[in-house]
Amino acid sequence: MAEKVREGRGAEKRAGRAVIDADVHEMFRSIRDLAPYLEAPWRSRIEVADGWPGPPGLPYAYPQISGVAKADAVTSDGSPAGSEYELVREQLLDEYGIERAVLTGGFYPTEMQVQPEFATALAAAYNDWMMENWLECDERFLGSVCIAAQDPRAAAREIDRVGAHPRMVQVVLPTIPHDTLGKPFYGEIFEAAVRNGLAVAFHQGNASATAVGLPTYYIEWHTAVAQSWQSQLIGLIAHGVFDRHPDLRVLMIESSWTWVPSLMWRFDYNYRSLRREVPWVKRMPSEYIRDNVRFTTQPMEYPDDPEHLYRMFEMIGSEEFLLFSTDYPHWDFDSPSQVFPKSFPKDLREKILSSNARKFYDL
Amino acid sequence: MPRTYHQERYAVCREEDLAPGEVRPFTVGGRRLAVLRTEGGSYRAISDTCPHEGASISRGAVERMWTSDEVGKYCHAGERVVAICPWHNFEFDVETGLTPNVSPRLRIKIYRAEVEDGEVVVYV
Ligand code: FES
């Protein structure tokens, strides 16, 4: 096993393949890492003994051998995987010759349903912490703006505050279960993203749920949670977000993607029948998806017949639709050299590995 | 525009037989047509067979097309009128035969309809 890893070291770079990774999770060791970036009254809320312990995690006990982490990414001192830059550099950036890695965090104050001012302050502190401790460490890192969407005006101010950083590429939102973020209530967030030349990305958070909420077992949640992106994507279109912002770029991260063709068919069919309910939506839903929305590769499906996977890709009707991602340091990490079945043509793999992301993020 | 040559003329009813917004079926020249009167008072004829799954369009509804420039607001799209199928509610613009904003995979056939001497006349 160790031999195999060494064999792969820098293989992508040696092979002349550029790789842009659209989903890398930088983590803090504990919520207290944010204390220096908070002003009163918020700083003391996490600094005092028995203060705020941080947001709740996913309620499941992970059955994987190293919890949510890939087993070789765990840190020596027990702090969360993804919290040590040197390990990220060694295991991901250098190992695979990653040209750019988009940091997507793992701390999403949009999920907090209480104390919105505290959530807003935490989002700003997180951005300052992330820029200082990650973006400044390595030029290969690109950043995502953390916000608390429950106060859209404050969130837009935060996007304006940090969005001008030359390596901030998007705003990241969790797929919350209690609201659709395409509603006009959240409109200032999308306006601010477009104003700052940023994409808007959706990633699951610890509050993300399935159509039945939290099913009994983690395997059920993990299989069904794509529903949370589906609901958010449908909401963006039904609430006319792309009609208001035709240039808005949206990325669905870690949602899986093979469900997209059937969602496009169903949504287009319903549009023929039910357009009268949402006449502010001016185009077929599938057209917005093809033109404005991209998806990341991980977690890649693994059908018995790899040809089937390529056919699903073809059904979407756009070669720009997928951006490669590893999801480092998590257990369901995908390797850039191993993830594509042979059914994906070589030039398409190259597009997915780097040029689609380069175009999407205008790198 | 529908072609006007090689067409037969059929008078289907008196103009007052159709109320504004009403649609009724007629069989002429071996074809089933849905003939309608818009709320604006003009007459249109389209196929009575929905190109989707074959429902009878004349069992559906006719209305001025809805549009909007703002979420939650509804207004009419000028004088555009749509026929709405009774089954799956697909809309068909009675001028073009197309579903609004949708790629032209399904198009309902349209026919020329006129009022001549108080009669509604279709050319098939
Ligand atoms: S049969 Fe007319 S819409 Fe389906």
Image: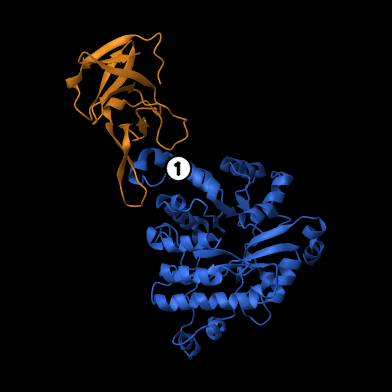
Residue B36, above or below B103? above
Q: Nearer the viewer, residue A343 or A143?
A: A143
- x and y percent of residue A279 in the render? 36, 44
- x and y percent of residue A192 in the render? 49, 63
- Residue A330 in view (yes/no): no
Q: Quadrant of the N terminus of chain A?
A: bottom right
The secondary structure type at the circle numbered 1 is: loop
Q: Residues within 10 Å of mark 1 (few under 14, many from 20)?
A: many
Q: Is residue A356 left or right of residue B105?
A: right
Q: Quadrant of the C terminus of chain A?
A: bottom right
Q: Nearer the viewer, residue A137 or B77?
A: B77
Which residue is the site of mark 1?
A283
Chain A is shown in which shade?
blue
- x and y percent of residue A12 in the render? 77, 58
Q: Nearer the viewer, residue A158 or A288?
A: A158
- x and y percent of residue B100 in the render? 40, 36
Instruction: Give the residue at x 74% y 71%.
Output: A90
Instruction: Give the residue at x 38% y 62%.
Output: A185
Residue B68, above or below A327? above
Chain in orange? Answer: B
Chain on which label 1 sits: A
**Which quadrant of the figure has residue B62?**
top left
Q: Is residue A60 left or right of residue A78?
A: left
Please state which amino acid type lies under the numbered disc 1: Arg
- Residue A273 in view (yes/no): yes
Q: Is residue A314 left or right of residue B75?
A: right
Residue B95, above or below A61? above
Residue A253, above or below A319? below
